[in-house]
Image: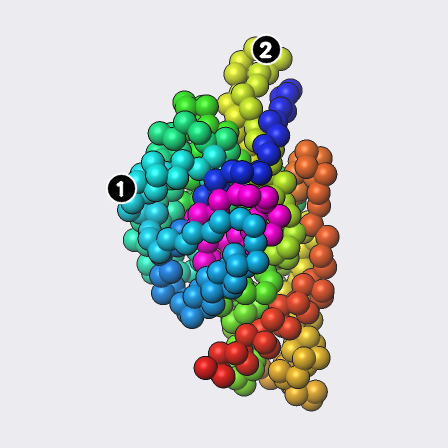
Amino acid sequence: MRINMKKHIELKNKTIFVTGAAGFIGFHLVKRLLKICSDSFVIGIDNINDYYDINLKNWRKEKLLDCDKRSSNDWKFIKESIAERKILDDLFECYQPEIVINLAAQAGVRYSIKNPDTYIESNLIGFYNILEACRHNKRIEHFIYASSSSVYGGNKKVPFSTEDNVDHPESLYAATKKCDELLSYSYSKLYNIPTTGLRLFTVYGPAGRPDMAYFSFTEKLKNGEKIPVFNYGNCERDFTYIDDIIEGIMRVIENAPVKSTEKDGSVIPPYRIYNIGGGKPENLMEFIHILSQELIREGILKDDFDLESHIEFLPMQLGDVPITYADSSAFEKEYGFKPEIDIKSGLHEFVKWYKEYSSQSLGK
């Protein structure tokens, strides 16, 4: 029986270090931090690689600069890679952040099969560099990092619980995320670093990643192309809207785990890991139909658009799993929050953003 203890962290006048700041989740998190954290200094780092369109990453960065102009907080963006150890060490030495949120990672299950080197560099070497920088910075109050639902691999038991065995990853991407969790546990135990990992479930929303299904499907349907639907459409995903993810991360940032004990007296390091997911898997075909309806509603597709003729059914692709389904009860119990934005509302917001962003891009 664990005694769960947390230390509240006041965010006012803190230095907060966010990796992957020009990425999807990083962008939304920094925007939220600049809005609500009084008199704080937010540092973002991102190498802005070309895994997907760098124009979108630069768009996010420019939007954050606009937020900074309207904020009472200071914001600094650094275009560098977390795989560069000396750069990280120098930054931590210079700014000495109290809170570190690691969202930088090479994402994508399928991409990891053909491009393994980038995953080792970012997800392992880069992650290790962050941990080392935290270890040598005595002011660290909380280290938070994004893990992934991919660590559950092909687990048959659903919903997925953080108590489940996750020793059988289906992809290199999943394996690197599991390694990050293990490294974090070790550093938490050895050096008493308060560490919280978040297994995120299929995050979507405005300014999202173009390699994600909802975004790539939108692009293809708009261009009259067929969309690839794997496992012949027999897939379910626990989609989580970006605002729900950011709310969850904010609650975690302010409450760091502390060293505690079991009833038998054995020490529990200040380390926790949680699922954050919608808790309601959506059938992929139903998801596609809702997306197409929203695209018609915003005038991106014509009213008489024939969706069925634009679908190409394919077998399951290597590295994929048929279902993701989060048991987020531990997070809900400890933080009093459960994702609540439904898939129709979330896709509506994405499509509205996409329409505006596309018109801006074409206008350049």
Residue 129's label in the rendered image is none
| Image spot of residue 110 (x, y percent) | 43, 60
2 or 1: mark nearer the eye: 1
Q: How crowded is mark 2: few (under 14 residues within 10 Å), some or many (20 or more)?
A: few
Residue nearest the observer in this picture, 155 or 307: 307
Q: Is residue 68 above or below residue 129?
A: below
SS at mark 1 in the image: helix
Q: In this view, does 113 lie above or below 276?
A: below
Is residue 232 at all visible to an observer of this figure?
no
Horizontal placement of 105 versus 40: left or right? left
SS at mark 2 in the image: loop
List the residue tagged with mark 1: 86
Please name the amino acid that badge 2 sits on.
Answer: Asp
* Farthest residue, direction left: 86
* Farthest residue, direction top: 265
| Image spot of residue 10 (x, y percent) | 60, 34
- Residue 46 falls inside the magenta stretch: no
C-alpha gap between disc 2 and disc 1 = 42 Å
- Residue 26 falls inside the magenta stretch: yes
Q: Residues within 10 Å of mark 1 (few under 14, many from 20)?
A: few
The magenta-colored residue range is 19-44
Quarter placement of the C terminus: bottom left
Q: Give the mark nearest the N terminus, 2 or 1.
A: 1
Residue plotted at (66% across, 43% down): 327
Please name the amino acid that badge 1 sits on.
Answer: Lys
List the residue tagged with mark 2: 264
Quarter placement of the N terminus: top right
Residue plotted at (57% across, 19% down): 260
Residue plotted at (67% across, 60% down): 282
Residue nearest the observer in this picture, 271 or 91: 91
